[in-house]
Amino acid sequence: MRRFLSFNDFFKEYYGGKTVKLSLDGGFSCPNRDGTLSEIGCIFCSDDGSGEFAGSKYLSLDEQIESQKEFLKNKWKAENYIAYFQNFTNTYGSLETLRKIYDEVVKRDDIKGISIATRCDCLDDEKIEYLKEISKKKTLWLELGMQTVNENTIKVINRGYSHKIFDETVKKLQDANILFLIHAIFGLPFEDEKDFENTINYIRDLAPFGVKFHNLYILKDSPIYELYKNKNFKILSRYEYVDLVLKALDTIYEKTVVHRITGDPPKAKLFEPTWCADKLSVISEIDKKLKEDNKKVVSQDDIKKIVGYWKNIDRAF
């Protein structure tokens, strides 16, 4: 048991057994890649659309699911599977396209939930209504790459839409009872402690279903590689990053599930910081600091109560 509400502990109770994500490629693109907004993408995003560990887009979804299950079977003795549409923008397309892709996964008995990574500028009212339909059949949540609340940083990272649009969209998702989690990156170019604090406090006040904390890392095939070489902005040290995660865990809503506490870069492409290549060591250090700070373990009774809270919102239950 962890000293924060972890993905593993939460979903073990939620579904009654070990739960893993199957990373899938739905064949989507991104308005920030295809020329609609730009051809660059968010500057930290890799050529694979941050989906280095996803299945092959040259396989059908059924084939990807089976190959991912086979790949993970020796690592995890999983009892439950979540279909995770990871790379690029997985609601960027016509409603007909979305139905063709997601209806195929919804009908599978071995898939307990669906996680969809997307952008808030690719969630119109029609698509939100369709996602509501899915959420009545399967546990569903959206993964939203907010990263920061600083409008200047949003422009620097070339996200392509304002924080105002993010705010308006999550309000619609809340009104529709659609679960969502937020990605936040600590160490974005030219941000400081105040910026990190503002992002953490925003997540606290929004009280989302989940959160993922990442450190900024520089991949050799990403646009930020050139910016870093030219501007040489500060990269967080391991100590600074761990300290920020501890502050965030201490601040966020107690019922928010922590899906990730550090980045997981493809080692062959990683330029800086080299310390984040050892993900397990970073997680271990965070756990050690929480123990030293005498943070209490999240008890099984606590988890059961929180699971009950989210199941009351999740219409698939």
Image: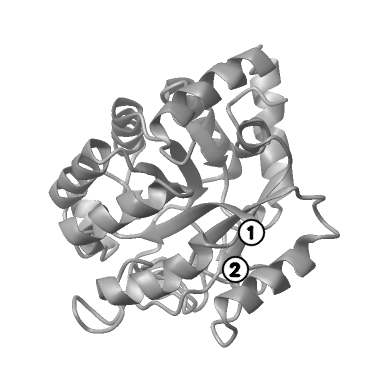
**View extreme (bottom): residue:** 58
Say what secondary structure mark 2 lies in: strand
Give the left or right position of residue 240, taking residue 110 as reference: left
Give the left or right position of residue 71, taking residue 274 as reference: right
Considering the image in quadrants, where does the N terminus appear? top right
Mark 2 is on which residue type? Leu
Q: At 25% across and 54% down in the image, what residue appears?
A: 128
Q: Is residue 175 above or below residue 137?
A: above
Closer to the camera in the image, 11 or 120: 11
Residue 270 disc label: 2
Disc 2 to disc 1: CB gap under 8 Å: yes
Q: At 48% across and 21% down in the image, what residue appears?
A: 250
Say what secondary structure mark 1 lies in: helix
Name the residue beneath numbered marker 1: 274
Residue 124 visible at all: no
Closer to the camera in the image, 292 or 86: 86
Where's residue 29, x and y in %?
A: 36, 78
**View extreme (right): residue:** 74
